[in-house]
Image (cartoon, rainbow, N blue to C red):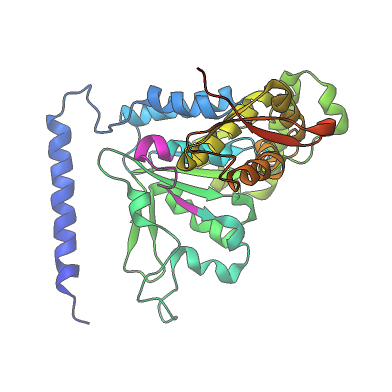
Amino acid sequence: FQPSLTDAIMPFINDVLDANQQHDTERRPATQSRFLFDPDQVMARLSSRIIGQSEALDEISNSLKVVKAELGDPHRPLATFLLLGPTGVGKTETVRLLAEALHGSSDAFCRIDMNTLAQEHYAASLTGAPPGYVGSKEGTTLFDRQAIEGDYGRPGIVLFDELEKANDQVIRALMNVLDNGQLRLSAGNTTLNFRNSLIFMTSNLGAGQQSSGARWLPAHWRAIQQKRRQEAALSARLDPEFINRIDHRIHYQSLPGDQLEQLVDLALEKLNQRLGRHKVQLVLDQAARQWLARQGHDPRYGARAMARAFRRHLEPAVAHYLLNPDECPTGSQLRASLGKGNTTLRISPIAPDH
């Protein structure tokens, strides 16, 4: 085996980068962080889009401040989070918004869908094929190195979505990632570095076990019961050694019914962002807003039920209007209101002020 020029140079380059980083750390004032993000600004963005999860967001905020202050162990990931809760309450959306705040794009993170790794024979796609197997020399894995490592001023972001659905072998492979921030690929010639990463895992464990009588309990007691169910389900599914390596277990609550109109506003904001390319903006009258809130209320599916209500009831009506150019001149302001029988939505132009 004859090493390539790149193989010979890369260790040297890494040594230089490490030395430069150490030199910069020594020269910086004690109160100055290498990280460029402002935790308060990041959390303001998250708080404006994630509904009903103030306790969860407070814990993430505290962790970001620790990262900003560079108080963490340099031989571990910057922080590891397990986000627990029912579907549609904002777990994955939290990670997307964090990527948007830190990197300017909601897709600027490495997402591993653990549901695709439920079978043992798919586990190799996480760390690559072992030596002697097809693909071992290429070192191909599911990981996006750039998204994982971030850069000097911004952390990388990794999401292991629906953690509990992965094969046990896959979950065990993550132990070293959580413990020392490194993952050696099966080929043995490459190591992925997670020490500049924020690692998120999501899980629905214990989310579907609420008794019918629990809905009549005060919200505080429902939250306590939900946490107990989630922790019990977590202990039953994952080994204590794995759980013990997670910095933050954050519990997301079922969305309260009195915040449905806020979900309507968020869904409308997203729709108007898409309508911007048509130079059209949409408003809802109060009757339409309340009707959509009712259509999008399903405690089992959270905000996803609201998104589905928009796709089913509002977007087709808007699309029908847009496909009639004589009715929809450029720059139109549109209003959605209830149609006949209060079972459909009607789109009409808003007359400009004179």
Q: Is residue 75 left or right of residue 167?
A: left
In the rendered view of the protein, which quadrant contains the N terminus?
Answer: bottom left
Quadrant in which residue 39 is drawn: top left
Q: Is residue 55 left or right of residue 128?
A: right
Quadrant in which residue 73 is drawn: top left
Residue lying farthest to the right in this orientation: 213
Which residue appears at 15% of the width and 28% of the height?
28
Q: Is residue 340 left or right of residue 239?
A: right
The x, y position of residue 323, in whole percent, is 59, 48
Does the magenta portion include 9?
no
Q: Is residue 204 above or below residue 259?
A: below
Which residue appears at 35% of the width and 56% of the height?
145
The x, y position of residue 142, in whole percent, is 45, 62
Q: Is residue 82 visible?
A: no
Depth check, front residue: 235 or 260: 260
Read off the magenta span. Answer: 99-111
The x, y position of residue 30, in whole percent, is 20, 23
Q: How many marks?
A: 0
Which residue appears at 33% of the width and 49% of the height?
149
The x, y position of residue 288, in whole percent, is 71, 27
Q: Is residue 221 visible?
A: yes
Which residue appears at 60% of the width and 46% of the height?
324
Q: Is residue 36 left or right of residue 60?
A: left
